[in-house]
Image (spheres, grey):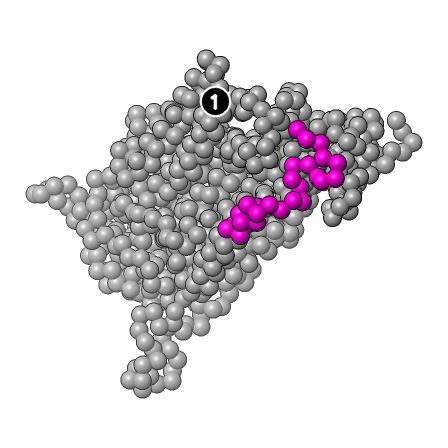
């Protein structure tokens, strides 16, 4: 059986945040929502400071706290390990958000705007882009996926619902890997089937010591980190992302 | 008759609650597939609420129903 | 106590100028709240102070959830009083039984409203909760047992308990005669009927006490079962919720009873005895809650580290310290007042009412401290400290909901006697 997961090699990460940008472009997430978030960390005092970077997608936990608490089953597990949100069913109670220890859920506080980052109706832009369709309108995001045909892909569909990282379900269904993994310039993010012993993720986990975030909470995540140690209470953020809408 | 109906409502109410909670609503425990997020029967929670309601309606029935042959 | 022959007792159906003015004020408050909610409904919850946890550094549950917990907590009183009267034979508190039951019903309706204003998609919620609600979610208990079951049970209690009085009033001609006749549903006060009512209310009391504990516990479980939220994950959460529900509920009941005593000149009926009993009972509930607080405080500070320490530091010495110590003060002062009166048997109505009022401040603030700090200071990954301050929209909506509840209460007072009609009254047994 397939169990999708990520192995993130922190030794390679330069903290460029290309994955965050790729995620935003791919999933059309609303402003200030970072389904993929790269922490820039600093530890210890000078001269022993250590700076390191940690991408944080949704952990797609096997024992996901969000799935357990969701009152309507809008948050669910798929058999291939994905933890997805049905944004046609979500009532916006935000229980998943308080239950999740990783802080990966984002509520749509306002109605999504098409022109949130750029005025696509700008005359100059329209002449340049032609009529090939606007870049934000990825039709795959509006489709339903999985055996039950549920609406899970992409972000910014409605106000008042919770959305989060989908492991780019719409790309997976088309045999592509998630946008963050595809765009990483230094091959930090490895994506694949953790149940397949010959997949790259399984090989990496076999070769190197790995850890998962907050394992003692018991969520059993499907995202593994290799290199370094988990962040602790002494870890500080260098550039704290604190953006609000 | 009145007492029988009352007891019947109470028993049936609790039964509905139990059945709905354990069998008709979405399964308890670790969820591993899409199906686990759906109730076995749509609107199963309504059955549960109706069950809770029946238990307490029994009191109204007990008080309001006219006396019959028994007692 | 006057027995009126022409007019209905307890100013039922009589509209005074003060009453109309009060209703007008309440309607204005509701209008403001309604406008605020309209803004939220059309623009989204961007108009509130709520934001996402983590990278937005906010709290995603705020004032609405605080008041949801508060309102549902208030509902503790009605059923417990009704059950105690029946099971422990406390006849002397009978005059407050109906106002307590009314308060319970209204508080639960307000609780349901607060849920609806909190969710992002209220129209969907109304369908999807009934359609999909999962027993695995701690919210299932809040939704089915508390809002639906508990509300239903309280209404039935209120209804059955009121039949005797409705039957008495139905004999008097007037605008409400048909309504009272409907309520009485053929009640004549025969010994058989009384016996039947006694039996029914006895069994309901027995059935309802477990529901009471379960219902308030499930609300505690909403928070207490979350392993990923330091400050919430605690086995004490459920019993603590039951205790604080009792404290706030009885506190507010004391206030309401005092107001009704004043407005209806019911000094005789709502006498010192009733308030003494309420005060003493409140005292024991406060003791229970203070005990939980001490245990909680010790557990949170003794060996904690990491995010747990971050939350407790914020609570005891940091950003939320003034609120925490305000809670402690508004629990300890009433406790002191009530203990003093209990020991020296020198009861003063003003003190009891002040205690009731203060514990309600404590209850609201403590709920805030349960809900918010764990979100702003309790992230397990190093997201940094968040912040949350409610906007006027949230205050206005909560105030509007309060006004709606008060309006329902004052309307009920005018259509049905808020206290039981004394035995010797005309047309009685």
Magenta span:
C1-26
In which quadrant of the rendered view does residue C167 lie? Answer: top right
The answer to whether one can see residue A33 in this image is: yes
- Does residue C83 sit above or below C374 in this rendering? above
Residue B30 in sight from this viewpoint: no
Whole-percent x, y for residue A147 in the image: 55, 60
Check the image and report above or below for C90 versus C242.
Answer: above
Q: In the picture shown, does residue C422 fall above or below C138?
A: above
Residue at 62%, 27% (x, y): give it.
Answer: C269
x and y, in percent, of residue A81 in the image: 45, 52
Residue name at image x 54 percent, y 63 percent: A149
Which residue in the protein does label 1 denote?
C348
Q: Which residue lies most toward the left here?
A: A47
Tell me, yes or no, whether the highlighted magenta stretch contains residue C20: yes
> Observer-nearest residue: B54 or B25?
B54
Pick whichever, C98 or A215, lies toward us: C98
Is B69 magenta? The answer is: no
Name the residue rendered at 48%, 29% in the picture. C353
- Picture coordinates of residue C226 (x, y %)? 43, 39
């Amino acid at each position: 059986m397939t169990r999708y997961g990520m192995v993130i090699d922190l030794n390679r990460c330069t903290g460029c945040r290309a994955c965050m940008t790729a995620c935003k472009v791919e999933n059309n997430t609303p402003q200030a929502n970072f389904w993929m978030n790269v922490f820039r960390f600093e530890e210890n005092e000078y001269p022993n400071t250590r700076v390191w970077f940690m991408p944080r997608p949704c952990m797609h936990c096997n024992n996901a706290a969000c799935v357990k608490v969701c009152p309507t089953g809008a948050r669910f597990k798929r058999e291939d390990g994905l933890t997805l949100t049905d944004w046609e069913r979500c009532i916006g109670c935000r229980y998943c958000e308080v239950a999740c220890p990783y802080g990966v859920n984002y509520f749509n506080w306002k109605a999504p705007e098409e022109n949130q980052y750029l005025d696509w109706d700008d005359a100059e832009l329209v002449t340049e882009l032609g009529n090939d369709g606007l870049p934000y309108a990825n039709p795959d995001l509006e489709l339903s996926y999985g055996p039950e045909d549920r609406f899970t892909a992409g972000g910014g569909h409605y106000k008042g619902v919770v959305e989060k990282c989908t492991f780019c379900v719409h790309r997976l269904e088309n045999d592509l890997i998630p946008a963050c993994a595809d765009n990483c310039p230094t091959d930090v993010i490895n994506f694949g089937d953790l149940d397949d012993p010959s997949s790259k993720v399984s090989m990496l986990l076999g070769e190197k010591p790995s850890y998962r975030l907050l394992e003692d909470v018991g969520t059993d995540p499907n995202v593994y980190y290799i290199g370094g140690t988990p962040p602790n209470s002494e870890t500080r953020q260098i550039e704290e992302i604190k953006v609000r809408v | 008759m009145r007492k029988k109906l009352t007891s019947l409502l109470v028993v049936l109410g609790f039964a509905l609650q139990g059945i709905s909670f354990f069998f008709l609503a979405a399964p308890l425990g670790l969820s591993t597939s899409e199906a686990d997020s759906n109730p076995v029967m749509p609107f199963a929670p309504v059955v549960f609420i109706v069950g809770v309601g029946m238990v307490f309606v029994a009191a109204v029935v007990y008080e309001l129903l006219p006396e019959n042959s028994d007692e | 106590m006057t027995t009126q022959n022409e007019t209905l007792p307890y100013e039922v159906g009589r509209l005074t100028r003060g009453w109309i003015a009060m209703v007008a004020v309440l309607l204005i408050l509701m209008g403001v709240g309604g406008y605020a909610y309209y803004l939220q409904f059309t623009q989204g919850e961007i108009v509130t102070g709520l934001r996402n946890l983590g990278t937005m550094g906010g709290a995603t549950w705020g004032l609405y959830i605080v008041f949801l917990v508060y309102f549902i907590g208030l509902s503790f009183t009605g059923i417990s009083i009704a059950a105690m009267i029946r099971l422990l034979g406390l006849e002397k508190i009978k005059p407050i039984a109906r106002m307590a039951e009314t308060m319970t019903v209204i508080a639960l309706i307000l609780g349901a409203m607060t849920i609806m204003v909190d969710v992002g998609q209220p129209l969907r919620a109304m369908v999807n909760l009934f359609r999909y609600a999962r027993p695995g979610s701690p919210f299932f208990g809040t939704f089915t047992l508390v809002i639906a079951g508990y509300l239903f049970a309280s209404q039935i209690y209120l209804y059955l308990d009121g039949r005797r009085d409705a039957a008495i009033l139905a004999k008097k001609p007037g605008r409400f005669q048909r309504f009272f006749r409907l309520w009485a549903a053929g009640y004549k006060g025969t010994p058989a009927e009384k016996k039947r009512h006694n039996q029914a209310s006895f069994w309901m009391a027995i059935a309802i006490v477990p529901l009471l504990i379960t219902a308030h516990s499930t609300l505690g479980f909403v928070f207490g079962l979350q392993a990923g939220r330091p400050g919430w994950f605690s086995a004490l959460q459920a019993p603590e919720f039951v205790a604080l529900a009792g404290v706030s509920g009885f506190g507010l009941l004391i206030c309401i009873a005092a107001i009704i005593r004043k407005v209806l000149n019911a000094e005789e009926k709502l006498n010192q005895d009733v308030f003494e009993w309420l005060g003493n009972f409140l005292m024991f509930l406060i003791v229970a809650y203070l005990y939980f607080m001490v245990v909680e405080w010790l557990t949170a500070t003794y060996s904690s580290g990491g995010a747990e320490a971050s939350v407790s530091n914020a609570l005891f010495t940091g950003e939320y310290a003034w609120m925490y110590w305000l809670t402690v003060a508004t629990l300890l002062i009433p406790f002191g007042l009530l203990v003093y009166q209990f020991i020296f048997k020198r009861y003063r109505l003003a003190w009891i009412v002040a205690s009731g009022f203060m514990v309600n401040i404590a209850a609201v603030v403590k709920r805030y401290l349960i809900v918010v700090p764990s979100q702003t200071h309790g992230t397990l990954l190093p997201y940094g400290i968040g912040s949350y301050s409610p906007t006027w929209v949230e205050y206005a909506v909560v105030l509007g909901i309060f006004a709606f509840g008060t309006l329902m209460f004052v309307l009920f007072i005018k259509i049905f006697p808020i206290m039981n009609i004394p035995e010797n009254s005309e047309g009685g047994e």
